[in-house]
Amino acid sequence: AQSVTQLGSHVSVSEGALVLLRCNYSSSVPPYLFWYVQYPNQGLQLLLKYTTGATLVKGINGFEAEFKKSETSFHLTKPSAHMSDAAEYFCAVSEEGGNYQLIWGAGTKLIIKP
Amino acid sequence: GAGVSQSPSNKVTEKGKDVELRCDPISGHTALYWYRQSLGQGLEFLIYFQGNSAPDKSGLPSDRFSAERTGGSVSTLTIQRTQQEDSAVYLCASSLLQGSNQPQHFGDGTRLSIL
């Protein structure tokens, strides 16, 4: 069965520092992988997705993620954190040839210290 | 509007009352999803529509919950005889096509509080 693990319910970084949010998944077939961001009192917004092709995916707001099949990971990074990046981030996975369902991680709240 | 629209944005009601939550998906999106997000939690899948049909209702927590979609567009989620544990944010999402590689587009949710 598919599952998604996000390491760390809260991650705190200083403004200007590297952001690294971890996501590991389990899937028996090639996965489709997504990162979403949720700002306070808002819905979720797609940051980026991996379906096929290049394993390094660039998204909005300077974020990128790399699909590493051997590590079953899809970690989200940003070189330099900005105060506006403070939000909750969700990783999700679905399977090629599977049904519509996204399997969601529990989320990581990103805190930016001034 | 261009995005998924949900109404009301906030709803406060007394225990035992019925509530109806509305979702207006992006025009042309055939797939529609309802999720529940409790305070500090991830997303709990409730139900999925492809057109007006709901192939999967397995996530509905009890028979007090029901949902329908008409005209392949607007959907309503109804909770009967509300309980305090129903308090949560209810999120709706839509996608252009059914398919595991399709991103879902979310509304801002309805924050439901049961007194």
Image (cartoon, helix red, strand yellow):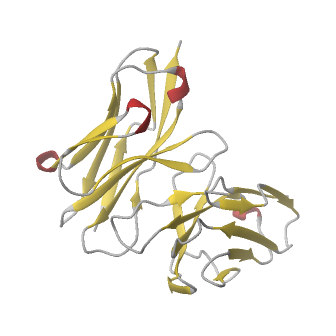
Q: Quadrant of residue B103?
A: bottom left
Split into 4 quadrants, where in the image is the N terminus of chain B? bottom right
Q: Position of residue A70 (x, y in %)?
A: 11, 48
Instruction: Single out the residue that lies furthest toward the left.
Output: A70
Q: Quadrant of residue B69?
A: bottom right
Q: Position of residue B104 (x, y in %)?
A: 47, 61
Instruction: Single out the residue that lies furthest toward the top.
Output: A114
Viewer-nearest residue: A39 or A109: A39
Vertical comparison of B7 with A53: above or below: below
Vertical comparison of B84 with A98: above or below: above
Vertical comparison of B93 with A17: above or below: below
Q: Position of residue A42 (x, y in %)?
A: 63, 46
Q: Residue at x 54, y 70 (%)?
A: B33
Q: Residue at x 86, y 73 (%)?
A: B17
Split into 4 quadrants, where in the image is the C terminus of chain B? bottom right
Viewer-nearest residue: B15 or A4: A4
Q: Quadrant of residue A8?
A: top left
Residue A12 in the figure: left or right of residue B84: left
Q: Residue at x 21, y 57 (%)?
A: A52
Q: Residue at x 36, y 52 (%)?
A: A34
Q: Position of residue A62 (x, y in %)?
A: 39, 30
Residue B110 in the figure: left or right of residue B101: right
Q: How many marks?
A: 0
